[in-house]
Image (cartoon, helix red, strand yellow):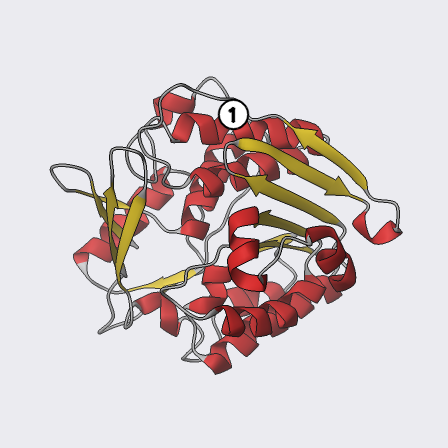
Amino acid sequence: MVELSGQPLRRTFGGDTFNTALYLARLGRSRQLFVSYATALGTDHISADMLSAWQEEHIDTAMVRRLEHKLPGLYLVETEPNGTRHYHYWRNDSAAKFYFATAISPLEAAIQSRQLDILFVSGVSLAILAEEAKAVLVTLLEQVKANGGQVVFDNNFRPQLWTAKQAQYWYRQALPYADLVIVSEADEQLIWGDCDVLDRYSAFGCDEVVVTRGHRPCLVCTEVGSGCPVISEVAVKVFETMRDPSAAGDAFAAGYLAGRLSGGSATMAAELGHELAAIVIQHPGAIIPLEAMEDII
């Protein structure tokens, strides 16, 4: 999506899974990780600018679909002095909503030809799609698992996009295929009305669960399905000032994935996630300058 934020307003690019993809691509440069991003854009100049910017970040764009007569989504972020964010979306007719609408998508083709080791999706990935397209995405999760790949699910919940009841239904369809889930405790409460995370995700068959809890240490749970889960509390790196909390959770997810995919323990991965998130919140907007995170790349 196109992001408008700051005073005065500046135009950048953002979006929950995109933020994770970009930060993972940056961290992946020294960790031999290859990141592709699947979405739909228009054929306009802004869409072309987005593609060029993503490619400069070493994100593979072969799975990006270009649709005529469609445009990228748009969102405006207002941040209060205390860090509270207010999002305003213009995305009802965005190109990304129509990714599965015509012919076979590049993502479907890649999964059919077993090109993917891991597929990362979020609650927003499901929320923006039409009902029949949601079903297509769930089928793709099943195919990734059948191919021997892994599915990572982020519970990102946007009340502006759908209701908690709708989210519950589709999460129940998707989560049985998830190996690793990264969940926000706040979103768990909004979606399910409780935070009984281990019981819920154990029932879905998820192997690894990471629970972010704002400024508090995250919980890392491995071997969840064994009946004897290993639970660790990993401290967050705290800064006295927070300029903008946008994309903190997305950055944490990227750090955690980078740590795990490069062979690190769950605890080490969570520490990397916290470290990146702590850097991101000191800068405005969802995407921070590359040089701001060079020390951890």
Q: In front here: 156 or 263?
A: 156
Q: Nearer the viewer, residue 155 or 120?
A: 155
Q: Residue at x 25, y 39 (%)?
A: 80
Q: Residue at x 43, y 20 (%)?
A: 239
Query: In this view, which residue lies farthest toward the bottom?
Result: 132
Residue highlighted by disc 1: 275
What residue is rendered at 77% in x and 37% in y?
A: 231
Q: Position of residue 178 (x, y in %)?
A: 68, 58
With respect to residue 289, does 46 lie above or below? below
Hey, which quadrant is residue 248 in on the image? top left
Q: Position of 241 compared to 6: left or right?
A: right
What residue sits 57% from the left and 69% below the top?
168
Whether residue 297 sits left or right of residue 87 in the image: it is right
- For the question of whether residue 32 can be seen, the reply is no
Vertical order, 265 against 228 (above or below): above
Could one spot residue 272 in this view of the protein?
A: yes
Q: Is 254 situated above or below 194?
A: above
Give the side of residue 12 with respect to residue 279, left or right: left
- Of all residues, the one furthest to the front in this rendering is 193
Say which of 20 and 110 sits in front: 20
- The quarter of the picture where the N terminus appears is bottom left
Q: Position of residue 253 (x, y in %)?
A: 54, 41
Helix, strand or loop for disc 1: helix
Q: Please state which amino acid type lies under the numbered disc 1.
A: Glu
Residue sticking out furthest to the right: 227
Q: Residues within 10 Å of mark 1 (few under 14, many from 20)?
A: some
Q: How many marks?
A: 1
| x and y, in percent, of residue 28 in the image | 54, 34
> Toward which corner of the image does residue 266 lie, by quadrant?
top right
Residue 22 locus on image (x, y percent): 43, 41
46 on left or right of 27:
left
